[in-house]
């Protein structure tokens, strides 16, 4: 039986701030990693026996295995060490926003071992004494039998997250609190929205509401899969539900922390009587060039135009930047103010600051 040891400053913060109604100045930070696609250099370690009936898809995934193996031999380890350097006495958690592993396994035992190896390595390298939180990504539940992998993910990750957070976690969507703030973890792939609505309503009245989800809640810049956002569909057949969830998030002035797109994107949007600020993050350091922060798109007019769905969101955009750079991130909550510092690659100095609130 593993016993999670919480550092003294974390316990003190929980005792002094949990449920406190006068914590407006309470400050802390969270170190964040985007998608990581952890993998082994030898594909046989986790992908032995994996076969796809689609030859083109199998070739594509074999290329991803090779990519992952290369980046996890060096670059991603340096990125983790950079993230470890961001941890200080005010750090409360290490967060990873999904796709912690590549997936594509042949059986459930391998899938669980894959997840455990990734969590053990990343937590141990970045901050072994802090709670580590990861959310459900599409690769985290992907294999020859996706249903089997989903069950394997839940069987491993729910007890692990319970241990990390010191509370019982039984579902892939749940909430935890840090002082006056609420963190709502959302399983983007669950079509049943009612549990998520209930969690968001429970978070109402919090100083800040952070929504942790793998996919963005806004359509994003990828002509092939732009519709892979929360409650998104290529044919927009869930438009009513999509708008309902958008309005609910806006009513909470939600701060969305997500991944999936393998880019660093900041989007601040006002509409439906409220505000949603989204930070999309990636730690998939597949090429040296991705450690250079260069803004490719900026401003509402440079938000994509290749599908009518983007036009529905464009009028509400107050700020928008998109870069292919990847790295590690530090969410800083200083009373009513919130910002995210981005460190591209393994940069020793801050690359960019994103003002959230």
Image (cartoon, rainbow, N blue to C red):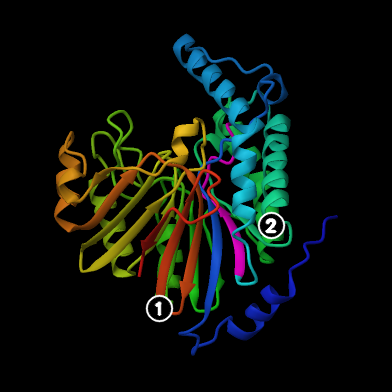
Query: Which residue is tagged 1?
Result: 336
Is 187 placed above or below 6 here? above
Tag 1–tag 2 contact (CB < 8 Å): no
Q: Crowdedness of circle 1 by 10 Å Cα count: few (<14), some, many (20+)?
A: few
- Residue 320, label in figure: none
Disc 2 on helix, strand or loop?
loop
Q: How many marks?
A: 2
Point out the stretch of residues depicted in magenta: 91-102
Q: Is residue 70 left or right of residue 26?
A: right
Q: Can residue 293 be seen in this view?
A: yes
Label 1 vs 2, first from the N-terminus: 2
Q: Mark 1: which secondary structure?
A: loop
- Residue position for label 2: 127
242 inside magenta stretch: no
Identify the residue at image location x=62%, y=42%: 78
**Would residue 195 be seen by someone viewing this image from the given angle?**
no
- Residue at the extreme right of the image, as rendered: 1
Q: Image check: 201 left or right of 45?
A: left
Q: Which residue shows up at 65% across the image and 38% down it?
A: 152
Label 2 packing within 10 angstroms: few (<14), some (14-19), many (20+): many
Q: In the rendering, at what x and y percent does residue 95 appear? A: 56, 55
96 falls in the magenta region = yes
Quarter assignment of residue 202:
bottom left
Q: Quarter holding the C terminus? A: bottom left
Quick one: which residue is furthest to the top in this view? 55
* In-front residue for pair 165/169: 165
């Amino acid at each position: 039986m593993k016993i999670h040891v919480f550092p003294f400053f974390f316990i003190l913060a929980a005792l002094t701030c949990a449920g406190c109604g006068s914590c407006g100045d309470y400050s802390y930070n969270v170190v964040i990693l985007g998608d990581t696609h952890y993998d082994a250099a030898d594909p046989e370690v986790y992908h032995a026996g994996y076969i796809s009936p689609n030859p083109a898809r199998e070739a594509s995934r074999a290329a991803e295995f090779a990519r992952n193996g290369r980046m996890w031999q060096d670059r991603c380890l340096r990125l983790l060490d950079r993230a470890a350097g961001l941890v200080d006495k005010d750090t409360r958690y290490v967060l990873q926003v999904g796709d912690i592993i590549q997936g594509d396994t042949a059986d459930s035992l391998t899938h669980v071992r894959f997840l455990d190896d990734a969590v053990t390595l990343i937590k141990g390298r970045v901050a072994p004494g802090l709670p580590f939180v990861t959310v459900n990504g599409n690769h985290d539940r992907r294999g020859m039998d996706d249903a089997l992998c989903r069950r394997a993910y839940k069987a491993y990750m729910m007890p692990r997250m319970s241990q990390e957070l010191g509370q019982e976690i039984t579902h892939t969507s749940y909430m935890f609190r840090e002082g006056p703030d609420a963190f709502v973890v959302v399983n983007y792939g669950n079509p049943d929205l009612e549990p998520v609505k209930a969690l968001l309503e429970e978070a109402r009245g919090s100083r800040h509401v952070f929504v942790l989800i793998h996919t963005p809640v806004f359509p994003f810049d990828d002509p092939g899969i732009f519709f892979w956002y929360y409650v998104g569909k290529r044919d927009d057949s869930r438009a009513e539900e999509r708008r309902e969830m958008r309005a609910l998030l806006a009513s909470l002035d939600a701060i969305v922390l997500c991944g999936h797109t393998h880019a660093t994107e900041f989007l601040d949007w006002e509409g439906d009587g409220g505000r949603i600020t989204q930070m999309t993050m990636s730690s998939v350091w597949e090429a040296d060039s991705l450690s250079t922060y260069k803004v490719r798109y900026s401003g509402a007019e440079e938000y994509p135009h290749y599908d009518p769905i983007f036009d529905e969101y464009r009028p509400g955009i107050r700020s928008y930047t998109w870069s292919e750079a990847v790295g590690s991130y530090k969410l800083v909550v200083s009373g009513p103010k919130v910002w995210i510092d981005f460190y591209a690659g393994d940069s020793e100095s801050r690359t960019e600051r994103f003002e959230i609130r």
